[in-house]
Amino acid sequence: MVVSGLRSTPSISAIVLAAGSGSRLRANRPSLIEDLCGQPIVASVLRVVVEAGASELAVVVASGAEDVVKTLQGRLGDVGLSFAEQHVQRGTGDAVLAGLSALDDLNYDYYSDDDDDGHVLVVHGDMPLLTADVLSGLIDHHLQSGAEATVLAAPAVGPLGRHAMLDEFIDTKRIKAASRDVAAETSRETAAEPSGERAIAGCYVIRRGLLAAAIRRTSPQALRGEFNLNDAIAVLASAGHKVESFTVNDLDSVRSVSTYEDLATAEAIVRRRLTTNWMARGVRMVDPSRTYIDADVVLGTGVVLQPGTILRGFTVVGDYVELGPDTHLTDCAVGQRAKVIRTTGRDAEIGPEAIVGPFAALEPGAQVAANVVTGPNFVGQYAD
């Protein structure tokens, strides 16, 4: 299996922790498959993990989390993906042990002569704002420093309240703390509240041959009986293994999502990233604040989006198309140089240079031929 951009040696596999109950969202489904700009939260995490260089992934889910498995299957192409159930939620350390077993099921050559060069990236699945730059920086620093374990750290302010302080688990005076600002600018929270304290931000790279043994040497926490992965990092440090930290100053990139308020904040950040990226690639948005584009949408060259345009799902828009105002398309295909005005559509096709609307409604399966002018109040039905 060959995936563009992956490191060949040393090998990087990944474990994504997705076994949380999400009870604070009070939804009748796992929180990590909540929609975020057209993608499940945890799918956003998996995507950047692959972009950062992991060729094999294990996702740890709660017992009975069939919805999570069904949602994620088939989303990563030919990248090796396996699932592990954490039957009883006994903490992040226990979840990582389950993930290691799932990686073995992917035929990971655990006992090869190159095993000492194998490393595992561990990421919390509720961090959809992570970027490949952040994870690549973490991995690169880990490999270049020759560390046995490296933790991602961030200034201990703002959205990091649920994460542990770095000094509680590692004697930071003994380790070199690398720092890299992977965002265009430091987040407002960091700028407003500068602090020398850092928190562990939910991502780790650990030498595979040491990981399981370090977890098994930890003790369960007194109150909840859970095994904490941070304790395993402390075990490695106290045993004299080289432990490093990699600090990211962009707090947005390490936000976790555990409430609907968190989800709304994350949605705004992701949409801002998407609109900025598309405008940099030549798409004109007359009013970006009133334009909504899902993560899987594809836009051609010279596209113009008028205010009130909403593009969802796997919509594909050809070159020099003009959409809007007030056009809402889901899973649609629009041919080049078409114009679509005040129209709603789902699973529909619009041919090149067609003019659709205003006030058109395209039902699933509808097809508008090339060069057709529909006029107002058009209802496009399935074409046999």
Image: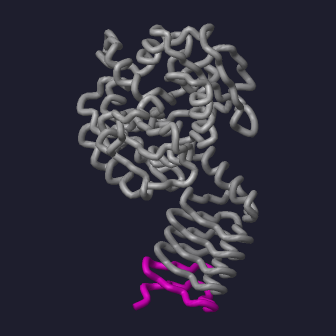
**What segment is highlighted magenta in the picture?**
358-384
Q: Is residue 323 left or right of residue 22?
A: right
Is residue 21 in view?
no
Residue 163 coordinates in the image, percent (x, y): 51, 22
- Residue shown at 40%/35% (left/top)? 17
- Residue shown at 43%/89% (left/top)? 383
Is residue 157 in view?
yes
- Residue shown at 70%/30% (left/top)? 180
Residue 8 or 342: which is nearer the viewer?
A: 8
Residue 143 coordinates in the image, percent (x, y): 57, 30
Residue 322 or 213: which is nearer the viewer?
A: 213
Residue 263 or 172: which is nearer the viewer?
A: 172
Number of marks: 0
Residue 4 coordinates in the image, percent (x, y): 55, 54
Q: Which quadrant is home to the N terminus?
A: bottom left
Task: Examine the structure image and report whether residue 360 is included in the region drawn in magenta.
Answer: yes
Majority secondary structure of the magenta segment? Answer: loop
Residue 27 coordinates in the image, percent (x, y): 36, 42
Q: Is residue 298 left or right of residue 236?
A: right
When the figure is inspected, residue 302 is found, relative to residue 136, above or below; the finding is below
- Residue shown at 24%/33% (left/top)? 87
Task: Examine the structure image and report whether residue 134 is included in the region drawn in magenta.
Answer: no
The image quarter in which residue 113 lies: top left
Q: Which quadrant is home to the C terminus?
A: bottom left
